[in-house]
Image (cartoon, grey):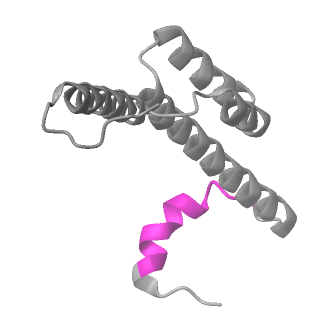
Amino acid sequence: MTIPPVFQQFLEPWLLILADDPVLRALQGCLLFLGVIVVFLVFYATRDILLRTRSFPAMLGSIVLVAFLPIVGFFLYLLLRPARTIAQRETDRKTEEILRLLEKDRKKDPRNKTQDTK
């Protein structure tokens, strides 16, 4: 496979860091791919924990866990993280509050024809 001269001029400085041996070049490619996966997992865990808690120690611990034990740490993070996001908990709290207010209004309204006969 030949590289067009336009791309070769651009890629030449970057190709110098790769080994000439195809086995070593494949190993370097695998390490590069693994590095990209690790960075992705750290960014994903960081974004996710920021949405789930306001506790700084929990945030720091989660990020450090995923950064130092990339794959195992990410799966541990998935097991230990809070089940719901802050927005989901807030929505549930507001929904329960509205339902309580509606229940109070239903009991106080004298025009309500559906009264319990128990």
Residue at (64% x, 42% y) in the render: 38
- In this view, the residue in front, 39 or 81, is 81
- In this view, the residue in front, 21 or 116, is 116
Residue 69 placement (x, y as % from top left): 75, 29
- The secondary structure making up most of the magenta span is helix
Residue at (71% x, 50% y) in the render: 34
| Count of all numbered marks drawn on residues in the image | 0
Is residue 57 depicted above or below 8 in this figure? above
Residue 75 placement (x, y as % from top left): 74, 38
Answer with the quarter of the image where residue 113 lies: top left
Residue 53 placement (x, y as % from top left): 46, 22
Answer with the quarter of the image where residue 116 lies: top left
Outermost residue toward the right in this view = 23
Region of the chain picked out in magenta, as a range: 7-19
Is residue 79 depicted above or below 65 in this figure? below
Does the magenta run of residues contain 14?
yes
Is residue 59 depicted above or below 17 in this figure? above
Q: Quadrant of the N terminus?
A: bottom right
Residue at (60% x, 50% y) in the render: 36
